[in-house]
Image (cartoon, rainbow, N blue to C red):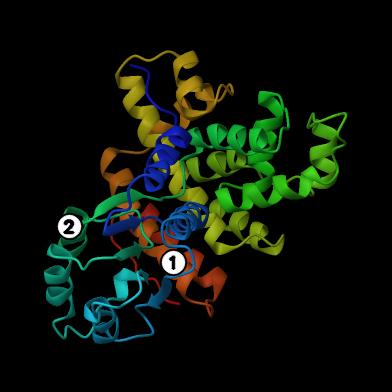
Amino acid sequence: MARKSPVEDYFSKIRTLESKIDPVYFLYGEEVYLQDTFLDALYSAYQEKYGSDWTKYVYHCSEVEPETILEQLVSNSLFSEPKAVIIKEMDSFDEKKQGGKSALRDYLRHPGNDITVVMLKESKRISDKFSKQLKKLATPLEVRIPWMREMDAWVQYFLKEKDISASPEVRSQLIDLAGESLQQLANEIEKLEIYLSDESRELTPELLEEFVGETRTHSMFEFADILGSQSLDKILNYLFSLLDEGESVSYIVKTAADFYENILLINAMVTAHKSDKEINREVFNGRNLAWKYKKIAPKFSQTEIYRAFPILEEADLLTKTTSAIDEKNYLTALFYELLNEEEADIHE
């Protein structure tokens, strides 16, 4: 049986809401588009099932105490309306250790009638004990930002939804222009549609460059070359130029994470004696980049690569939750830690 594309896999799970709404869902991952699409599908399913006779409650764990959320879950009476309870920022749930986690687990083992609980953990990693327990007690759904090798399938989906055609080269350029966020891709394609006529629905390179925006001076592949040099001075000079051009620290951290993921894949595929053609197809959406990454990948050991993932995950969370960061000092400390065996303290 052919493996489902990431798009087909995600929407097959979304479609189950049309016939069956589970009492508890656990979403883990940082992609806003996938989170919002699931919630919109849930609300539509509730509207179809209950009409207007239901209520939505949204809680941010960083802003409310656990008892407030738990009281909402157990406050059902015989005449209560159905409700959807959305609990965001699960990493911050019961930070004061007041017994909220134990009480929530007890509820999830015997959830109430006509209540759907959706818990969101805005991280793709669920290695902690509490997250593992939630995953077992709920219907889990991964909503992480797709890896670069998965992005073309999503670009094709968004274009098809708008009845827009585009060559593989143009789709690749769109990914480079719009970034790796599905939300950003969807927004850019939404803007593009305005400039396409009913007679011509083809997205050309000229239209893409004209209406999506200025092409990034620094592509992800130039980023790979620079990071592959393993020279802290060279890397920082390049990253500071990105900041000066308006790129965010969050974008830099995400691109670095994709770089290490690609390096890990390339090393594994080379070990498995995969051809350049196979590598290009499976990792780079057909683009001829295997030769470049095969020169870079051997410079990084398995230990270095696996050590980088938790460092970059922590950095990603920090950049999304902290507004006041000395960007250049932070990136200096971050990439010093990535390039050195002895961990460096990262100061905001």
Locate the N terminus and report the quarter of the image it occupies.
Answer: top left
* Residue 269 image label: none
| Count of all numbered marks drawn on residues in the image | 2
**Residue sitting at 33 percent across and 53 percent down?**
21
Q: Is residue 121 visible?
A: yes
**Residue sitting at 35 percent across and 74 percent down?**
81
The percent position of residue 241, horizontal first and vertical second, equals 67, 58
Counting residues from the start of the chain, the first of labels 1 and 2 encountered is 2
* Residue 333 image label: 1
| Number of other residues with Cα within 10 Å of mark 2, as a class: few under 14, some 14 to 19, many 20 or more | some
The amino acid sitting under disc 1 is Ala
* Element on which disc 1 rests: helix
The percent position of residue 154, horizontal first and vertical second, equals 55, 37
Examine the image and state in which quarter residue 114 appears.
bottom left
For the residue pair 274 and 190, the one nearer the viewer reads as 190
In the picture provided, is 236 more to the left or to the right than 205? Answer: left
In the picture provided, is 174 more to the left or to the right than 116? Answer: right
In the picture provided, is 284 more to the left or to the right than 297? Answer: right
The percent position of residue 218, horizontal first and vertical second, equals 67, 46
The amino acid sitting under disc 2 is Leu
The percent position of residue 117, horizontal first and vertical second, equals 30, 65
Q: Is residue 61 above or below residue 180?
A: below
* Element on which disc 2 rests: helix
Q: CA distance from mark 1 to mark 2?
A: 39 Å
Q: Which residue is mark 2?
A: 137
Locate the C terminus and report the quarter of the image it occupies.
Answer: bottom left
Q: Is residue 232 visible?
A: no
Q: Is residue 32 above or below residue 275?
A: below
Examine the image and state in which quarter residue 65 appears.
bottom left
Q: Is residue 120 above or below residue 38?
A: below
Q: Nearer the viewer, mark 1 or mark 2?
A: 2
